[in-house]
Image (tube, rainbow, N blue to C red):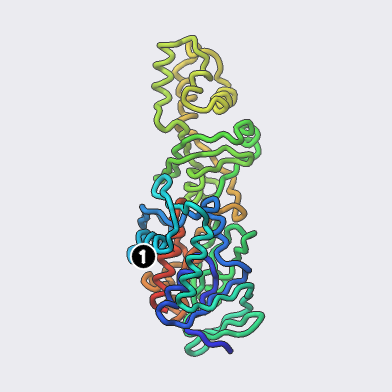
């Protein structure tokens, strides 16, 4: 039976980072993964350039049943700390909108950097390893695989959530938590496109491929970013962001001309240019295909002079406060993250260790901490990994 101080299950962002930190502390570390290549979600992220952090990271950018749980780890390992690591490896990067940092070249540079950090800590990395069972003995954990059994003092679960199953996502981490009696927050897809019911889909089919700047809100939460009409419903950054807050059957409010007061605009233009066609006036503020679709759907046509105040109110509300009831989401197939996971009440916020099971740690996406779109989930992976890596 091979002996280690620490076994990390899952060679994604959090797993590699944790293994590297622990290894460089002089711990004997084994990092295993069921896939044949490490860091697959890193590889595909950010269009292949990896949105590796966000300089504006704060606890407000995360969802959890316990919103304060993430504070300690995020405070101790900041975006600047990860940026310093990136600079050390001479990886060129740039900032996009809203504080998002991307590699200039390739996300593979981040994977190679993490593997190099593991090498510095003499971490043993073994891929294509399936964990068949995990047992806790008096002071140690036994991890049984198809090849051999490994034993360690500490066990770190960094196996992620259920999003993008074609990349190898599985409920493994949740099953480990349940085996050891830890509570779970039911998982669901997050940062995911929303679907329309058949009737709405049919009406809006002509808009597939159209994008607009929009403010999308649900209750007290709102995001202003791009919105994209698709052949199934709505996507784009604003929709992905709000999707994490919306449950099936709930509505969102969409403003597709956030810098305009459409009612005032229409009233003024009705006075100044009464003979202008309504759809043409709308096209000055929103894409023409959207303007045409709105007029046809609401059955309000003709010149501005023909429109009552009531009609102008109806049109303006459809632009500035369109209420959309989603019939569901695209699900884990296209979700960027999984909401929910191991209940944070079961874990130490300083070490990610299970309170009931000394030596057992959960980090990254498997925990009930989920970031907004834009590099926040990677920052949680780095921060939670370091929190565990410094103590295991």
Q: How many labels does the image show?
A: 1
Q: Which residue is drawn at 47% across and 38% down?
A: 253
Q: Can residue 185 be seen in this view?
A: no
Q: Can residue 152 be seen in this view?
A: yes
Residue position for label 1: 77
267 lies above or below 181: above
Q: Quadrant of the C terminus?
A: bottom left
Q: Position of residue 25 (x, y in %)?
A: 40, 79
For image coordinates 48% across by 47% down, the residue present is 242
Q: Nearest the camera: 275 or 102?
A: 102
Quarter of the image with the N terminus is bottom right
State whether residue 151 is above or below residue 44: below
Residue located farthest toward the top when viewing the structure as drawn: 275
Mark 1 secondary-structure assignment? loop
Rendered view: 81 above or below 120: above
Closer to the camera, 265 or 211? 211
Image location of residue 170, percent across then percent down: 60, 65
Label 1 neighbour load within 10 Å: few <14, some 14-19, many 20+: some
Give coordinates of residue 383: x percent, y percent: 40, 65
Q: Position of residue 316 (x, y in %)?
A: 46, 26
- Residue that appears at 54% across and 50% down: 47
Observer-nearest residue: 109 or 358?
109
The answer to whether 228 appears left or right of 132 in the picture is left
């Amino acid at each position: 039976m091979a002996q280690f101080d620490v076994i990390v299950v899952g060679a994604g962002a959090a797993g590699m980072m944790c293994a590297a930190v622990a290894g460089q502390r002089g711990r004997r570390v084994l990092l295993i993964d069921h896939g044949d290549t490490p860091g697959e979600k890193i590889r595909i992220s950010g269009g292949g350039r990896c949105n590796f952090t966000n300089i504006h990271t704060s606890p407000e950018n995360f969802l959890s049943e316990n919103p304060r749980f993430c504070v300690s780890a995020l405070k101790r390992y900041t975006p600047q700390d990860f940026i310093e690591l990136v600079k050390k490896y001479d990886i060129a990067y740039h900032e996009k909108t809203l504080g998002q940092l991307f590699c200039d070249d390739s996300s593979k540079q981040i994977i190679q950097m993490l593997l190099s950090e593991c090498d510095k800590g003499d971490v043993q990395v073994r891929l294509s390893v399936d964990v068949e069972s995990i047992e806790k003995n008096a002071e140690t954990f036994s991890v049984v695989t198809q090849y051999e059994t490994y034993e360690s003092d500490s066990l770190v679960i960094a196996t992620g959530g259920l999003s993008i199953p074609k990349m190898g996502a599985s409920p493994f981490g949740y099953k480990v938590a349940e085996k050891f009696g830890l509570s779970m927050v039911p998982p669901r897809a997050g940062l995911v496109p929303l679907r329309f019911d058949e009737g709405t889909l049919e009406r809006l089919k002509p808009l597939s491929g159209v994008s607009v700047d929009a403010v999308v809100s649900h209750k007290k939460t709102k995001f202003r970013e791009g919105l994209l009409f698709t052949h199934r419903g709505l996507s784009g950054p604003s929709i992905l962001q709000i999707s994490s807050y919306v449950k099936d059957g709930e509505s969102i409010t969409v403003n597709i001309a956030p810098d305009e007061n459409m009612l005032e605009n229409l009233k003024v233009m009705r006075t100044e240019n009464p003979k202008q066609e309504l759809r043409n006036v709308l096209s000055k503020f929103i894409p023409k295909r959207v303007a045409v679709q709105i007029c046809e759907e609401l059955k309000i046509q003709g010149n501005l002079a023909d429109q009552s105040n009531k009609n102008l109110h109806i049109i303006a509300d459809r632009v500035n406060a369109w209420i959309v009831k989603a019939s569901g989401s695209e699900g884990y197939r296209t979700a960027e993250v999984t909401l929910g996971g191991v209940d944070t009440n079961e874990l130490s916020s300083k070490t990610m260790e299970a309170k009931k099971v000394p030596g057992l740690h959960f980090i990254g996406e498997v925990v009930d901490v989920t970031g907004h779109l834009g590099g926040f989930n990677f920052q949680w992976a780095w921060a939670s990994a370091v929190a565990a890596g410094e103590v295991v």
